[in-house]
Amino acid sequence: MSEAADLLDPEARDRPPDNQLIDLDALYRESGICGMLAGMDRELVGLTPVKTRIREIAALLLVERARRSIGFKAEPPSLHMCFTGNPGTGKTSVARRMAGLLHGLGYIRRDHVVGVTRDDLVGQYIGHTAPKTKEVLKRAMGGVLFIDEAYYLYRPENERDYGQEAIEILLQVMEDNRDDLVVILAGYRDRMEVFFRSNPGMASRIAHHVDFPDYEADELLEIARLMTADMQYRLEPEAERAMADYILRRMAQPRFANARSIRNALDRARLRQANRLFEARGSAIGATDLLTIAEEDIRRSRVFTQ
Amino acid sequence: MRLTQGQFSFLPDLTDGEITRQVQYALDQGWAVAVEFTDDPHPRNSYWTMWGNPMFDLRDAKGVMMEIDACRAAHPDQYVKVLAFDSSHGFETVRMSYLINRPAEEPGFELLRSEGPGRRIGYTVRSYATGRPSGERYGGETRHGT
Ligand SMILES: Nc1ncnc2c1ncn2[C@@H]1O[C@H](COP(=O)(O)OP(=O)(O)OP(=O)(O)O)[C@@H](O)[C@H]1O
Ligand SMILES: [Mg+2]
């Protein structure tokens, strides 16, 4: 636009030219989130609704950055989140990845997660809570504050509970320090709902509610494969079939904790494998023996005898 | 008289944005950042009062800025400085130190000469402010008779 036109229409100066071209794909590549999203797909099985939501947030932040780059108004969106789901559905794992993503997208300054529970925020006596909560907030600034089982902050049965004080400080910071901190609350769905019902201030500050579904049996088997590979072990084919049986049985039992139950089962299978090798220590063993988890290492689980 | 002590002392007072960047630099070096304050501006006064503990476990300057703001709000009429302590072997010392707050009025220093035997002169520097008890030196907080 020429200077003369500027003079005729003073507002034109504040308005970005509408013919400027933006290379969204270049922004996408520069941010490095492409690799992070691919890593998430590779290392986290299933969780389609969660991954979809994360992609949407990434798109939002990229477009916001594009808008800002040519001078449009671009209010940084509020990104406080709540992750709900049963035990072992991957809430903590995703929260840890969130920091990397939001950092890659330029939304937070630092790629760190400070994970806390009630005990880290709430004090034992009058005057103890505020400094404790502030200490945690200071450490989390610039990154992600992850509050696991957030509903324990609120104890309605105790009128004088200090948790309320921590909640109020959090509310203040979530509102005033949006550019400095992303708060992620996590917990079981029903209890989280009760918590929000009694803390509407908190509910209104959370922009994204993400629900983590329970895993299907085939997803759990895939998770088992990933975990064994990660630990540098191998399930022999019969052991893999045994694992599939194990999963079906374990899912029907009480205190089933999704992926965490799989991790625990594998830890016990390693224990049995080690014992089996140790018992047979008379003969020399090879690298394959050290690597392999055999069918019996899994079938000897209590799950099969109950 | 404008007090000049520590780094940057001949520059204009740092803005909050500049303080943030200096603090972030210190944190990036792995130094622990501390905040201290005093109303005794004598250059040999090395015992300033600590504002809380040094911050060992912070990664982002915003956490330090929260403490700086709190200290300045509690002592608007005193000197406040930021220190960065390097605990690594061989240093184990303060690597940065600069003022981030000063009283509105700084009366400055008096030079006292005392004449000794043989017309020898001894010199002493005394700040006008320390003539009054601590806490009443710079008007602000607990002024007498008001
Ligand atoms: N989709 C997945 N793919 C691979 N591994 C997973 C997946 N989900 C969870 N895991 C693994 O399962 C374990 C438990 O996951 P995580 O701690 O994230 O669950 P959680 O939802 O936070 O559980 P809790 O509610 O009990 O705290 C971790 O070792 C994690 O690596
Ligand atoms: Mg968890």
Image (cartoon, rainbow, N blue to C red):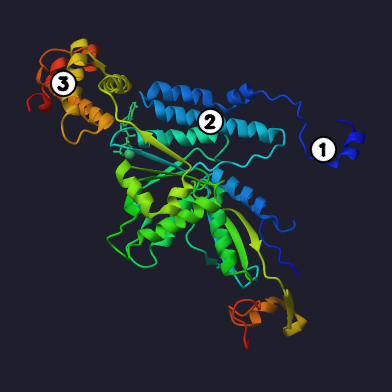
- Disc 3 or disc 2, which is closer to the eye? 2
Label 3 to label 2: alpha-carbon separation:
41 Å
Q: Residue B21, position in %: x, y?
A: 63, 47
| Amino acid type, residue under disc 1 in the picture | Ala
CB-based contact (under 8 Å), mark 3 and mark 1? no
Are labels 3 and 2 on one chain? yes
| Amino acid type, residue under disc 3 in the picture | Ile
Are labels 2 and 1 on one chain? yes
Q: Residues within 10 Å of mark 1 (few under 14, many from 20)?
A: few
Given the current orientation, which residue lies at the most extreme right position?
A4
Q: Residue A208, position in %: x, y?
A: 46, 39
Chain hosting mark 3: A
Are labels 3 and 1 on one chain? yes
Against A124, residue A239 (above or below) is above
Sequence-first disc among 2 and 1:
1
Against B84, residue A243 (above or below) is above
Reading the image, the residue beneath label 3 is A298
Question: Tag 3, which secondary structure?
Answer: helix
Task: In this rendered view, identify the residue nearer to me: A213 or A186.
Answer: A213
Question: Tag 1, which secondary structure?
Answer: helix
Question: Tag 2, which secondary structure?
Answer: helix
Reading the image, the residue beneath label 2 is A58
Reading the image, the residue beneath label 1 is A12
Q: Residues within 10 Å of mark 3 (few under 14, many from 20)?
A: many
Relative horizontal placement of residue B65, taking residue A281 as reference (left or right): right
Task: In this rendered view, identify the residue nearer to me: A34 or B71.
Answer: A34
Q: Residue B57, position in %: x, y?
A: 46, 49
- For ligand 1, give the image quadrant: top left
